[in-house]
Image: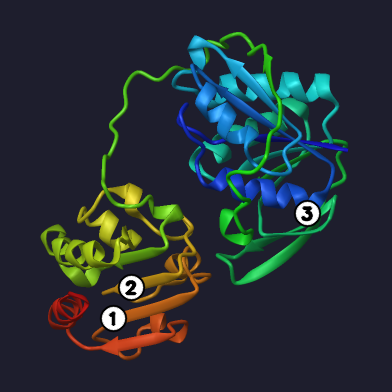
C-alpha cells in the first residue's frame, strides 16, 4: 500500500497543513510519497524530504506550475496515481487542497472523502457534518481513496529529521483550461491564521473596521493572528482571508480570544477545537459562552484596552 500526498507550498517552503496530512497518512499505514508540483520549487521539495516517515518526494517542475492552477496540478497527480498504483491520494483541506482533490477524484471516477479528522482503518474515516455538530464514519469502497485532511484533527509531523530521496518526475502538459492573470496578496508580519498558536478574533460587536486596530494592539502583545467572524467580514470590517468558521478557515490554536462574537454555530465550527477559548461579550446569554473556558461579560471597548494594558 502506498500513499501520495499533495504538498501545499509556495515554491519555497511547505504550508503547515502538509505536516498534519503526513500524520494522517501515517495512521493509514504504508509508504508515504509527497508530490511537490511547482516551478523552481527545489527548496519546498527538500523541506518535504526532511519530514520523518516520508519514503520519497516526487518533484514535478514546470513553468506553468509557477502559479499552479488546480486543473494542471490535478492532471499531474492523476498521471502519477495511474502510473504508481497508489491506494490513497491525500491533500490538506486548505484552499489549495480543496481545489485540487475534487478534480482528481472526478478524473479517476471515484468518490472523495472530505475533511477527515480521524482514521479508523485504511478505508474508514471520521469526518464532521452539520457544522461539526455530528460526526460521520465513512467507509470508502473505491480502489483509490481520495482524501482531504482537516489539519486540526491531527498533530503536525516533525518538520526535520528525515532524509527521503527526491525524484524528478514529469509534470502533465498545460491543460490550458485556466491560468492565473493576477494576484492580490495580503502581507503581514503576524503569524498565519491557520497555524498561529494564539488567535484574536473580532465580530460585529466591534462596530467598524477602525475598531479592529484595538484587537491588533492586543494581538501584538500576544504574537497572535487576527481572525474575524463572517458577520464582520460581510460588513466590510476586515478582509475575507481573516474569516474563521464553517465557510472560512478552521483553526485550533492554543488560545482563541473571541471579542464581540456572539457564537453562531457556523463560527463555532471553525474554532471550537481550540485548546483554551476566552470570550468577551456584553451579552451574558451569547452562545459563545457555552463553549468558552473563560468569559468576560462587559463592554469590549473597556475590557480589551484593560487586558492589553495588563499584558504590557
Q: Quadrant of the C terminus?
A: bottom left
Percent of width and height locating residue 147: 70, 44
Q: Position of residue 59 (x, y in %)?
A: 63, 21
Foreground label between 1 and 3: 3
Label 1 with label 3: CB-CB less than 8 Å: no
Viewer-closest of 101 and 44: 44
Question: Left of 45 or right of it: where is 52?
Answer: right
What residue is shown at x 31% (from left), y 91% (from top)?
284
**Which residue was labeled with disc 1?**
280
Residue 27 image label: 3
Q: Position of residue 6 (x, y in %)?
A: 63, 34
Q: Earlier in the sequence, mark 1 or mark 3?
A: 3
| Residue name at image x 61 percent, y 8 percent | 173
Q: Label 1 to label 2, Cα distance in Å?
A: 6 Å
Mark 1 is surrounded, within 10 Å at the Cα level, by few (under 14), some (14 to 19) or many (20 or more) other residues, namely many
Asked if marks 2 and 3 touch (Cβ < 8 Å), the reply is no
* Structural distance between the alpha carbons of marks 1 and 3: 38 Å
Q: Are marks 1 and 2 in contact (CB under 8 Å)?
A: yes
Q: Does residue 289 sit above or below 31 in this rendering? A: below
C-alpha gap between disc 2 and disc 3? 33 Å
How would you rate the neighbour count of disc 2 (Cα within 10 Å): few for under 14, some for 14-19, many for 20 or more? Answer: many
- Which label belongs to residue 258? 2
Q: Is residue 110 visible?
A: yes
Work out whether mark 1 precedes mark 2 in sequence or the reverse, and give the earlier one: 2
Q: Quadrant of residue 97?
A: top right
39 in relation to 305, above or below: above
Q: Secondary structure at mark 3?
A: helix
Quadrant into which the N terminus falls: top right
Amino acid at each position: 500500500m502506498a500513499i501520495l500526498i499533495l504538498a501545499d507550498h509556495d515554491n519555497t517552503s511547505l504550508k503547515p497543513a502538509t505536516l498534519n496530512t503526513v500524520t494522517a497518512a501515517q495512521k493509514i499505514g504504508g509508504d508515504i510519497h509527497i508530490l511537490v508540483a511547482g516551478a523552481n520549487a527545489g527548496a519546498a521539495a527538500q523541506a518535504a524530504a526532511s519530514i520523518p516517515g516520508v519514503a520519497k518526494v516526487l518533484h514535478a517542475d514546470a513553468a506553468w506550475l509557477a502559479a499552479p492552477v488546480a486543473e494542471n496540478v490535478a492532471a499531474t497527480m492523476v498521471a502519477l496515481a495511474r502510473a504508481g498504483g497508489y491506494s490513497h491520494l491525500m491533500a490538506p483541506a486548505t484552499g489549495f487542497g480543496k481545489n485540487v482533490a475534487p478534480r482528481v477524484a472526478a478524473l479517476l471516477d471515484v468518490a472523495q472523502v472530505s475533511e477527515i479528522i480521524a482514521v479508523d482503518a485504511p478505508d474508514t474515516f471520521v469526518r464532521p457534518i452539520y457544522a461539526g455538530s455530528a460526526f460521520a464514519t465513512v467507509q470508502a469502497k473505491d480502489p483509490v481513496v481520495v482524501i482531504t485532511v482537516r489539519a486540526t484533527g491531527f498533530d503536525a509531523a516533525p518538520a526535520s529529521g528525515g532524509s527521503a530521496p527526491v525524484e524528478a518526475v514529469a509534470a502533465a502538459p498545460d491543460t490550458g483550461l485556466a491560468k492565473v492573470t493576477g494576484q492580490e496578496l495580503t502581507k503581514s508580519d503576524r503569524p498565519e491564521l491557520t497555524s498561529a498558536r494564539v488567535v484574536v478574533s473580532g465580530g460585529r460587536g466591534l462596530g467598524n473596521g477602525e475598531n479592529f486596530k484595538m484587537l491588533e494592539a492586543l494581538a501584538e502583545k500576544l504574537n497572535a493572528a487576527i481572525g474575524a467572524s463572517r458577520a464582520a467580514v460581510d460588513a466590510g470590517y476586515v478582509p475575507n482571508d481573516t474569516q474563521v468558521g464553517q465557510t472560512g478557515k478552521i483553526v485550533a490554536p492554543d488560545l482563541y480570544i473571541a471579542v464581540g462574537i456572539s457564537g453562531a454555530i457556523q463560527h463555532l465550527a471553525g474554532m471550537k477545537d481550540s485548546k483554551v477559548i476566552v470570550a468577551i461579550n456584553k451579552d451574558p446569554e451569547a452562545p459563545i459562552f457555552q463553549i468558552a473556558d473563560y468569559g468576560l461579560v462587559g463592554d469590549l471597548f473597556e475590557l480589551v484596552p484593560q487586558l492589553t494594558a495588563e499584558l504590557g
